[in-house]
Image (cartoon, rainbow, N blue to C red):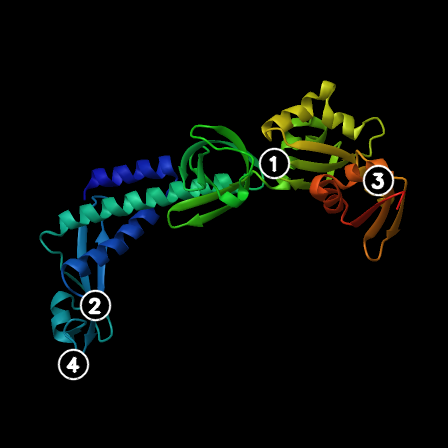
Amino acid sequence: MNSEFLLALNEIEKEKNISKEILLDAIDAALVSAYKRNYSTNHNNVVVNIDRETGSVKVFVQKEVVEEITDSLCQISLDEAKKISGSYEIGDTVNIEDTPAAFGRIAAQTAKQVVLQRIKEAERNLIFDEFSEREHKVVTGIVQRIEKDNIYLDIGKTEAYLSPREQVPTESYTFHKRLKVYVTEVRKTTKGPLVTVSRTRPAFVGKLFEEEIPEIKDGIVEIKSISREAGSRTKIAVWTNDKNVDPIGACIGAKGTRVQNIVDELNGEKIDIVRYSEDIAEFIKASLNPAEVVSLEINADEKEAHVVVPFHQLSLAIGKEGQNARLAARLTGFKIDIKSDAE
């Protein structure tokens, strides 16, 4: 190594925000390992010194000054130590240079490997930090590769993983398709940050509403709860304490444009926007929309509701394969038993 190498470390420090001293310390440790590996020694009394001005590398073997030598690899007699410096006493440590002739080439290769590895680690950490801030948010990706049923998306500086269980059954994913996804988790792995994403989570729909509806983003309208069967139907309960704002109207938008943009992103998934109420009876009635409720009884302790609807609307209230009632139950947190007025 030489002074040019040290100048390169200065540039790396500026560009990659990696401390030059941390790099040099890492190189020191790597050079000790390289020395032991190449010169067949397992002793822990080897130190490497890199001159911070010239970049020259020297290897030293540390030996303890003793009266009687029992291990010549780690000890030196007082008489021998005095030949080096008259100031040495029993118990002192003597650094004896033992730099092999060919060690410069080994040192250069090792230092290069360490620096490249540290740069890679630093870049991974930057990516991890960046995407950690996007956890539980929506990002846009492009389908980059498909392995069996696993989808990998290009989301900028890294890949996102869309597992089969987070894919909507009714959707097809093709190469280069652009789609929005919800970031469920960002974690560190040996291969770098792993960003896992979803298209099925109820929170994904909530974030799409937040992006599309300014009143939700500004906190004027609040999403109280969401229930979803991905690819088929979603119910979302909204509320506001601003008497001048209609929360449902705000979400639908002029001529339905706002909610339609969300429906388009979800490939035609039906969305029921429900007015939330602190009166649980009113909330349950609204949750069963579009069916009308004739009457209902609530058992708050058991969190159960017994609902009566017109006979001709029984199938509408229950929904296909029970979907409407099931989503209403999840939305309100109440078990809902539906019967017709004829029953």
For mark 3, does the 10 Å Cα neighbourhood hold few (<14), some (14 to 19), or many (20 or more) residues? many
Q: Are marks 1 and 4 in contact (CB under 8 Å)?
A: no
Name which residue lies at 67% across and 32% down: 270
Mark 3 or 4 closer to N-term? 4
1 in relation to 292, above or below: below
The percent position of residue 307, horizontal first and vertical second, equals 85, 45
Which residue is under mark 3?
285
For mark 4, does the 10 Å Cα neighbourhood hold few (<14), some (14 to 19), or many (20 or more) residues? few
Q: Are marks 1 and 3 in contact (CB under 8 Å)?
A: no
**Given this view, does label 4 or label 2 mark the residue nearer the observer?**
2
- Rendering quarter of residue 242: top right
**Label 3 is placed on what type of residue?**
Lys
**In this rendering, position of residue 53 left or right of residue 295:** left
**In this rendering, position of residue 185 left or right of residue 248:** left
Which residue is under mark 2?
43
Mark 1 and mark 4: Cα distance apart in space: 82 Å
The percent position of residue 316, horizontal first and vertical second, equals 78, 36
Mark 2 and mark 3: Cα distance apart in space: 78 Å
Q: Nearer the viewer, residue 308 or 204?
A: 308
**Label 2 is placed on what type of residue?**
His
Q: Are marks 3 and 4 in contact (CB under 8 Å)?
A: no
The percent position of residue 339, horizontal first and vertical second, equals 84, 46
- Rendering quarter of residue 83: bottom left
Which residue is under mark 4?
68
In the image as oriented, which residue stretches furthest toward the top?
Answer: 255
Mark 4 and mark 2: Cα distance apart in space: 20 Å
The percent position of residue 337, horizontal first and vertical second, equals 81, 49
Which residue is under mark 1?
231
